[in-house]
Image (cartoon, rainbow, N blue to C red):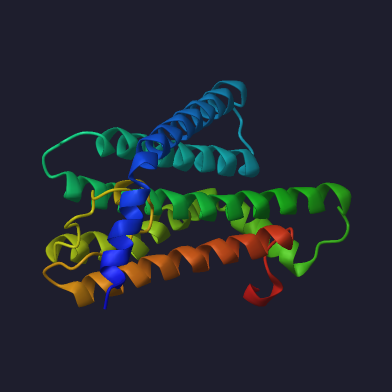
Amino acid sequence: MALPLEVSRLEGRWESLFPAIQWIQFAVATLSVIGSSSLITYIVFQNPQKSAEVKSLLYLSFSDLLLGICWLIKALVYGTAAAHKDSICYNLQTAGEIFYLASLVFTVSYIWCLYAELRRKHSPSEQSTAAQVTDYACQGGCVMFLLSSLTPLLLMTPVFFLGNVNECFHNFSQNHRCMLMHSEPLPSTNTSVCSTLYLYGVTVFLASFFFSLLTIVNNGPPQWIL
């Protein structure tokens, strides 16, 4: 089959665009770090008594800040000849997906708390089951924070551990692979494990994304989870 050769030729044609993509990612990551840092600073100093939704927004901004830092480091590492560059790129991508998942979960948390607050203000005498459950969840801010923080970490632990044990990071810095969040593994010491981890990471990301999208579109927690 000539497919690997065709892919190699296609990547060669796009080789001149990789530096431009690197600088675009550098600029976007820098703006993300500046924006999230500014929002965190404003919340910390302007809102000494934080409500549940403001706390959720603070956690969301912090996870966005860490995600922006990961993207920024990847953009800087991509153009260098750093030692163990493959391993650095692989672990940065995995860490970036953890912060990306955390951002999605904190977005859901923020929407739920905002939903409960709006229901409380506009319908003080009428509390639906969804609003009551959401309100209880927001009141337990520490529990919500722990769940939102630990869930992405636990989901991506196999990718960290098994990926490094099976050396799935081989050739990970080749061409554009260091700058993408999901990169299909090239042939390595254990291709089957690495391919499984790749599919697992993509599945976890897509499931989290569509769950968050469903929650946001419904303006509150989906009825089927109550």
Whole-percent x, y for residue 73 in the image? 31, 35
Q: Quadrant of the C terminus?
A: bottom right
Whole-percent x, y for residue 184 in the image? 31, 64
Report the side of 144 relative to 158 (left or right): right
Tell me, yes or no, if residue 184 can be seen here: no
Residue shown at 48% from the left, 40% from the top: 64
Residue closest to the eye, 1 or 85: 1
Number of callouts in the render? 0
Whether 73 is drawn above or below 153: the answer is above
Residue shown at 61% from the left, 34% from the top: 50
Whether 92 is drawn above or below 194: the answer is above
Report the side of 8 relative to 101 (left or right): left
Whether 119 is drawn above or below 15: the answer is below
Whether 172 is drawn above or below 76: the answer is below
Residue closest to the eye, 142 or 15: 15
Report the side of 74 relative to 128 (left or right): left
Whole-percent x, y for residue 177 in the image? 31, 52
Tell me, yes or no, if residue 85 can be seen here: yes
The image quarter in which residue 221 lies: bottom right
Q: Quadrant of the N terminus?
A: bottom left
Residue closest to the eye, 223 or 216: 216
Residue shown at 54% from the left, 49% from the top: 141
Residue closest to the eye, 32 or 119: 32
The residue furthest top is 45
Whole-percent x, y for residue 210 in the image? 58, 65
Residue shown at 33% from the left, 45% from the top: 15
